[in-house]
Image (cartoon, rainbow, N blue to C red):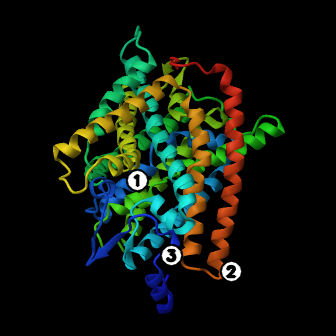
Amino acid sequence: MILSTPLLEREQEQGIGNRRLLPIHEEEDGIVKNLDAGALFVLKSKGSWLHCGYHLTTSIVAPSLLSLPYALASLGWLAGVFCLVIGALVTFYSYNLTSIVLEHHAQLGHRYLRFRDMAIHTLGPKWGWYYVAPIQFIVCYGAVIGSALLGGQCLKTIYLLSTTDGTMKLYEFIIIFGCFMLILAQMPSFHSLRYINLISLLLCLAYSACITAGSIYIGNSSKAPKKDYSLSGDTVSLIFGFFNASAIIATTYGNGIIPEIQATLAPPVKGKMFKGLCICYAVVTVTFFSVAISGYWAFGNGADSLVLSNFFEDDKPLLPEWFILMTTIFICLQLSAVALVYLQPTNEAVEHIFSDPTSNQFSVRNVIPRVMLRSVMIVIATTLAAMLPFFGDLNSLIGAFGFIPLDFVLPMFFFNSTFKLSKFSPTFWLNSIIAVVFSMLSAIAVIAAVRQIGIDAKTFMFFADL
């Protein structure tokens, strides 16, 4: 998008008007100035477009993709594949729009490093501080809790495959995973995760290939379940199932931290994010579609909420134990990287408040508060995961009111508002239609998630051994 010279001059003169209430990160000769501790230490701008691709891949291609066959079971072949394609196209488009808006502000000399910065600039301080900032925190911290829970479940699966008379409970495995996270959480910056996220990229390709191969093997074996692709249930259940499945697909593509990832790029940032997105969506296409289609083909409407569960029948593996063990280890390891990525906005907010940007990042003044506060955040997340093993239902609710607005609605509004698109512009109407459709989906998905929580509430037990 090329803006006219008068518009550029007007924005440079006006800045962001009366809404400019946050410290703005001015750029001089490509170097960002006047950084607070959170931006300076956590969102360190040193990465390349390859590093950006690693971060993006870990934030999107996570073990939540193992629920895609379950989503297709509520949609059927035609609607299911259609939703997968639309989710990929719309999120790639949305994330690219967000990147373009951020690049535009950086070219004007005001580089925004956080989602809330951009929201305050566009929506004003009330919407930025009291809507965008809280839902981003809830979404990201919810992902950390969900990763701890799923990591504990993976460890328990490994344990049960290794012993026939194990007595350890789920919450014990969640605590073990939390201890592992306690160590990794001390990585000083988002940029320092680049090689961990490269390994994460390879791991998600590995376990997706294992899941796909396992599904095809079981689907062709004599132990294969009867394949039934019909949509069963009454009209109300089918309607809610449709919207719940659509929300699962939408939130599986969710990110919620595009500005923070773009902040890790060394200036100038122009064009780098698009290259990173291309890397990410090459992996997304391979993993999402292979797992979703093979899992639904093999298990039909009997696909579980995590397709790996379908690899067992009456607690007996349908595949060699070493294969399931290897797959589960890959998933468990990648979960630690996913948790680290979604912990970064929390780390940034904490260091923004408690660290001193005038002191060295590794000075005693900054290291002690960082270690203490990050440890506290991991302990809280681990405790909540152990206490709420039914967190998956709550995570659906969080995704419905968090991921969908952050990834499908707000970027459209930011782009239209930033570039002052004419109401006769096709881009304006495309963005507006996407925003309206996904706002409606978000509202309905929240209702569907609350309904599901109500149905499952009778089985909820604190510290249950699921």
> Does residue 312 lie above or below 127 as drawn?
above
Q: Which residue is mark 3?
A: 17
Secondary structure state at the residue bearing disc 1: helix
Q: Is residue 248 left or right of residue 57?
A: right
Q: Report how far apart the C-alphas of labels 1 and 3 lie in the structure.
A: 36 Å
Q: Which residue is mark 1?
A: 57
**Disc 1 and disc 3 in contact, CB within 8 angstroms:** no
> Does residue 207 lie above or below 382 as drawn?
below
Residue 117 spot, x, y in % from top left? 45, 62
Residue 321 seen: no
Task: Point out which mark residue 402 bears.
Answer: none
Please name the amino acid that badge 1 sits on.
Thr
Pointer 2 local density, CA inside 10 Å: few below 14, some 14–19, many at least 20: few
Which is closer to the viewer, label 1 or label 2? Answer: 2
Task: Point out which mark residue 423 bears.
Answer: 2
Secondary structure state at the residue bearing disc 3: helix
